[in-house]
């Protein structure tokens, strides 16, 4: 039987004769040590692949010696049919035990300090299986022995940071800090393990932070997309409402126009018939006047009936101009209101409120502040009615956007009105005052009630008091109820946090909102209380530092709002 070719027993990784061959599930064989090293460098802990056919194994298979292949190799070596190994080249590490032909070293033994070819390695493994073997190392003895004394480098000088022999310890390094090599290795391994542990922890934290950052980014993207979708829906709905209102208004105008035009056509037809009849009568009369014979004239004229009737022209029943003017005013008011709301909307987006001091509490501060407030004593409504005062608007103070109704007892926001000029009139702010109330006497009390109308809960309408020095001209804080530093008021605009706004001497704060049918205002010595008036009286807010002897009830009217003084 012919012997197999030696090429059949060459490892495809190290290109030498198999050493402890192992066979993969795909059928290819390699050195056991070469296969371990290959997988450690090129594969993950779960999968592996064959370096020859690249077949992937999942999970990674366990590696074991192919005992049959080992026996075949041993028999071939014993019979001389298999050379012990390849000859060493110029760059290879040679076997230290070969005497004639120097073969390529397969492993270096750190205990024996020799490099072994495949043949000597097999013998060495049988005799010293517990020795430490590594890949071939050039000049192994020179690296492992002291150049000065030829002794093993079993010691380490921490002062100089170098390996030394036992003679060096007692000579050149006598006063240095020296330890054995295993001690130094143990110390450094512990330091490396500690550093590796810290690196792993930092890596885990970094990966966790990256994951959290990605989660935040995804959340922001999702939230942004939801907000964009919701905003788009709302703007689309608003556009649809506006377009529908536009179609309805135009339809009303067109309908009124068609009604009037049909009436015009009918009246024109009647007038044309009357005109034709008058023309025929006129022709008859003209012909009669041309008769010269008296008897014939009398005979012909006696046949005519008195057909001349008084002119009574039919009138249009629809006052189209009045109707269109009414529609035009309504649309103008709507456009003004939308424009003002858009301006407020832009201001809220820009958050440009730095010119005015503002005190906004956090949710926790707001809850604590409301919990810590003492519940004030509230008298029955009948007790307040004893101090009821009749108020009257000062019409000379009303801004052009304030319109009066119901005998000057109701005001609402409207398109500008050309009121006569007056020193007391607010020329820019949509505000109006009432007659003054004196609060300097400790026995002077005043109570009155208001009815308010708002199209939306977010509409602005301010009720309160101011002294006489508030500016009547201009648009600055000194002329604005609430921003003026000698004014006290509530803005019953419901914020996104479900609160009202209270203004005291120009400083804004938030207070809990309540439901109401009417607003009661009770003025006493140096204090002002606001109540929600339903079936009961509920305190909304109380100002306790009104340092003015004479104050004016003051109101700021926003678009879509109205206010009435109640008769008590």
Image (spheres, rainbow, N blue to C red):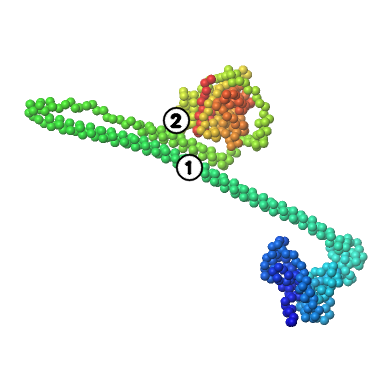
- Up the image or down, 21 lies above or below 308; here it is below
Mark 2, residue position? 418
Tell me which residue sits at (48%, 42%) in the image: 239
Horizontal and vertical percent for residue 159? 86, 61
Element assignment for label 1: helix
Query: Label 1 neighbourhood size at 10 Å, few (<14), some (14-19), many (20+)?
Result: few
Task: Give the mark, 2 or 1, whose residue is nearer the N terminus.
Answer: 1
Tell me which residue sits at (59%, 25%) in the image: 531
Mark 1, residue position? 239
Label 2 to label 1, Cα distance in Å? 33 Å
Report whether residue 267 is seen.
yes
Tell me which residue sits at (72%, 76%) in the image: 8
Q: Which disc is residue 106 wearing?
A: none
Tell me which residue sits at (66%, 34%) in the image: 367
Horizontal and vertical percent for residue 264? 30, 35
**Quadrant of residue 165 within the rendered picture:** bottom right
Q: Is residue 67 left or right of residue 537?
A: right
Q: Nearer the viewer, residue 174 or 516?
A: 516
């Amino acid at each position: 039987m012919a012997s197999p070719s030696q090429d059949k027993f060459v490892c495809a990784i190290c290109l030498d004769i198999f050493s402890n061959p192992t066979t993969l599930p795909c059928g290819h064989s390699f050195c056991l040590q070469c296969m371990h090293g290959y997988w450690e460098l090129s594969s993950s802990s779960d999968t592996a692949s064959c370096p020859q056919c690249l077949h992937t194994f999942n999970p990674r298979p366990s590696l074991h010696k192919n005992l049959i292949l080992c026996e075949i190799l041993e028999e071939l070596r014993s019979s001389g049919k298999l050379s012990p190994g390849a000859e060493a080249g110029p760059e290879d590490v040679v076997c230290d035990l070969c005497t004639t032909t120097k073969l390529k070293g397969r492993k270096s033994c750190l205990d024996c300090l020799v490099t072994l070819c495949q043949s000597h390695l097999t013998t060495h493994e049988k005799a010293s299986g517990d020795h430490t073997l590594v890949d071939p190392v050039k000049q192994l003895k020179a690296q492992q022995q002291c150049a000065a004394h030829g002794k093993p480098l079993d010691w380490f000088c921490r002062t100089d940071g170098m390996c030394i022999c036992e003679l060096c310890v007692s000579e050149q390094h006598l006063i240095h800090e020296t330890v054995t090599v295993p001690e130094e290795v143990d110390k450094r391994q512990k330091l490396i393990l500690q550093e590796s542990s810290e690196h792993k922890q930092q890596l885990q934290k970094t990966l966790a932070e990256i994951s959290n950052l990605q989660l935040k980014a995804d959340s922001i993207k999702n939230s942004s997309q939801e907000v964009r979708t919701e905003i788009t829906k709302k703007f689309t709905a608003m556009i649809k409402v506006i377009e529908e209102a536009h179609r309805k208004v135009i339809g009303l105008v067109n309908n009124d126009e068609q009604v009037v035009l049909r009436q015009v056509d009918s009246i024109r037809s009647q007038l044309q018939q009357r005109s034709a009849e008058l023309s025929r009568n006129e022709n008859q009369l003209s012909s009669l006047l041309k008769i010269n014979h008296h008897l014939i004239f009398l005979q012909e004229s006696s046949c005519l009936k008195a057909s001349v009737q008084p002119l009574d022209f039919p009138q249009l029943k629809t006052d189209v101009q009045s109707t269109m003017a009414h529609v035009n005013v309504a649309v103008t008011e709507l456009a003004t209101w939308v424009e003002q709301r858009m301006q407020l909307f832009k201001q809220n987006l820009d958050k440009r409120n730095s010119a005015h001091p503002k005190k906004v509490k956090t949710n926790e501060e707001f809850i604590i502040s409301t919990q810590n407030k003492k519940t004030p004593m509230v008298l029955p409504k009948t007790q307040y009615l004893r101090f009821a005062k009749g108020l009257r608007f000062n019409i000379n103070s009303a801004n052009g956007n304030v319109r009066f109704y119901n005998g000057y007892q109701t005001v609402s926001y409207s398109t500008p009105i050309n009121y006569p000029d007056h020193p007391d009139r607010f020329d820019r702010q949509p505000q109006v005052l009432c007659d003054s109330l004196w609060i300097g006497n400790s026995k002077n009390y005043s109570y009155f009630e208001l009815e308010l109308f708002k199209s939306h809960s977010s509409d602005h309408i301010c009720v309160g008091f101011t002294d006489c020095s508030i500016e009547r001209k201009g648009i600055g804080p000194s002329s604005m109820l609430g921003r003026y530093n000698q004014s006290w008021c509530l803005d019953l605009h419901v914020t996104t946090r479900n609160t009202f706004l209270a203004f005291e001497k120009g400083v804004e704060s938030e207070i809990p909102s309540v439901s109401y049918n009417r607003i009661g205002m009770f003025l006493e010595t140096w204090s002002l209380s606001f109540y929600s008036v339903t079936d009961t009286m509920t305190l909304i807010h109380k100002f306790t530092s009104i340092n003015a002897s004479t104050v004016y009830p003051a109101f700021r009217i926003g678009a879509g709002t109205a206010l009435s003084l109640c008769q008590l």
